[in-house]
Amino acid sequence: MPRKFAYSPVKRATISVRLTPSIKDTLVQVAHTEGLDVSEWLRDLILNELRRREALPSISADLRGETLNE
């Protein structure tokens, strides 16, 4: 199901990560199983971890309108 955002900040920053081909294949499979592309899946993973660590209040203005998997 596509996600709809009332407001979504422009995402300009990028992060490059090196993975083994098998880990990348697994990542793609898991993301697609959840109906997300890899970028969305990783973004949700990162945001959920930041929330778990209570690090989001300091960056919450940048996240207005984001939908997090719960």
Image (cartoon, grey):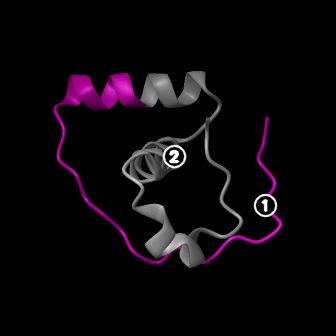
Would you name the residue on which mark 1 appears?
Answer: 5
Instruction: Work out whether mark 2 precedes mark 1 in sequence or the reverse, and give the earlier one.
Output: 1
Residue 21: say if magenta.
Answer: yes
Label 2: which secondary element: helix
Residue 45: say if magenta.
Answer: no
Label 1: which secondary element: loop
Question: Where in the figure is residue 1, as x and y percent of width and height?
Answer: 79, 34
Report the side of 21 relative to 52 (left or right). left
Q: How many marks?
A: 2
**10 Å crowding of disc 1: few (<14), some (14-19), many (20+):** few
Magenta span:
1-27
Amino acid type of the residue tagged 1 in the rendering: Phe
Question: Residue at 77% of width from left, 72% of height from top?
Answer: 7
Report the side of 19 relative to 49 (left or right). left
Magenta: main secondary structure: loop
**10 Å crowding of disc 2: few (<14), some (14-19), many (20+):** some
Q: Eyeballing the image, is 63 above or below 10?
A: above
Amino acid type of the residue tagged 2 in the rendering: Asp
Question: Residue at 44% of width from left, 42% of height from top?
Answer: 45
- Which image quarter is the C terminus in? top right
Q: Are circles 2 and 1 on residues that touch, CB within 8 Å? A: no
Report the side of 19 relative to 56 (left or right). left
The numbered mark at residue 44 is 2
Residues at marks 2 and 1, CA–CA distance in whole angstroms: 14 Å
Question: Residue at 78% of width from left, 61% of height from top?
Answer: 5
- Residue 65 lies in what quarter of the image? bottom right
The numbered mark at residue 53 is none
Question: Where in the figure is residue 38, as x and y percent of width and height?
Answer: 47, 42
Question: Where in the figure is residue 55, as x and y percent of width and height?
Answer: 39, 61
Q: Nearer the viewer, residue 29 or 49?
A: 49
